[in-house]
Every structure is written in structure tokens, then in C-alpha cells.
Image (cartoon, grey):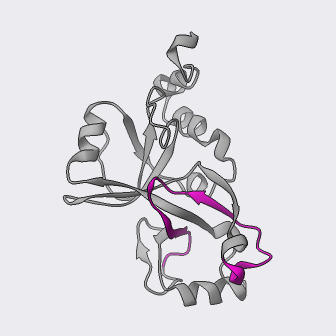
Amino acid sequence: MRELSQGKLLVADPFLHDPHFARSVVFLAAHDADGSFGLVLNRPTEVRLDDVLPEFSGLNLVLYSGGPVEPDTLHYLHATRGMVEGAQAVTDSLSWGGDWQHLVELMRTGRLLPSQIRFFSGYSGWGGEQLAQEIAEQAWFITPAKNEYILSNDAELLWKRVMTDMGEEYAMLTNAPVDPRWN
């Protein structure tokens, strides 16, 4: 089994029927013995960021649903390691969060581009060994994250793309019906 750690992707088994996670791709921004924090990468909402935050007027950024936990919170991933003050480095090139005012300034001045950031309402969270148990039950596959997945604008096809990139045995699973009774 691939190692569970920060900076990895959780890819939902095609038969995971939880409506929050069915055919989802979750980026693990944090993982330790106390639990895991992730953001669903392929659940865009109908809301634009500037609809709720006027400081982003004119940027036309989509707000994604990061998961079912605390849906009134805002989180962001960016491919600007070291640029946003206070951000937590997750991979060699990706960071999570950071100083809000500094982020707004970077975006207003064009030093941080809309293509380098993704905003999420809510998050996905697991306590202690909960995620390890779900993986043991084969609800999730683990794979390395790539920037092109994190910042992909093709949310509808992301799950299938990641599964296909994982290899032939996973690619075959992308043809499974959402409901096995349809087979």
C-alpha cells in the first residue's frame, strides 16, 4: 500500500457511495497521529469567490467545496511555496493557507495569479486512525499529488484522470457504473 502522508491524494474507490466523497479526489494538506485534513479537489460550487469576498472582484474564481466539515470556513491551496507569509508548506511547490491580507495584496498586484490558487469552503477531516481504517476497508486509494491535479480546471474528469494515471488496474475501475445495479 502506498504510504499515507501529507501531500498525497486520496482517490475514492468507485463504489464509495458517501455523497460528499463519491468519485472524489482529496488532497491531504495535513496528516499525523491525531488526524488528517484534506480538501476535495473536484467539487466546484456554483459560487464565485467575488460573490462572497468583494476584494476578489473581477477575478472570476470558482469556490470549491473542500468537504462537509465546517462549510462556512475558507481554505486555500497555492503553488507559491514561500510567497504567502505564514503559509504551511505541504509539498515542494504547494502551500496551504497563510496571512489573508498578504494573500489579498499578492493577488491585487498580480504577483499571485488566479491559476496558482484554489479556494475551498469547508474541508474533509478524519480523527486519529479513522482514515487508516477507511483505507483498510478499501474506500480510498493513495497516490502522489501533482500540481496539475491540484489546480486542474477540469473537475468533472479529474477522478477518472487520476485513476487512469495510477495504472491499468485502476483505469479499468473508471468504467464501473456509479451504481453496480446498473451493470
Instruction: Specify the farthest residue to the right.
Output: 58
Horizontal placement of 32 versus 19: left or right? left
Horizontal placement of 121 versus 134: left or right? right
Counting from the top left corner in percent of width and height, residue 82 is at: 48, 81
Placement of 56 over or under 96, stated as above or below? below
Counting from the top left corner in percent of width and height, residue 115 is at: 69, 67
Counting from the top left corner in percent of width and height, residue 66 is at: 51, 57
Horizontal placement of 75 versus 36: left or right? right
Q: Give the residues drawn in magenta, as a range.
A: 53-81
> Which quadrant would the C terminus be assigned to in this image?
top right
Residue at figure coordinates x 54%, y 19% from the top left: 176
Residue at figure coordinates x 60%, y 38% from the top left: 161
Work out whether residue 17 or residue 119 is closer to the camera in this orientation and state it.
17
Counting from the top left corner in percent of width and height, residue 138 is at: 33, 30
Q: Is 42 within the magenta?
A: no
Q: Is 63 within the magenta?
A: yes
> Which quadrant would the N terminus be assigned to in this image?
top left
Residue at figure coordinates x 66%, y 77% from the top left: 53
Residue at figure coordinates x 19%, y 58% from the top left: 33
Q: How many marks?
A: 0
Q: Give the quadrant of residue 109.
A: bottom right
Q: Give the quadrant of residue 55.
A: bottom right
Placement of 99 over or under 41, stated as above or below? below
Placement of 24 over or under 99, stated as above or below? above
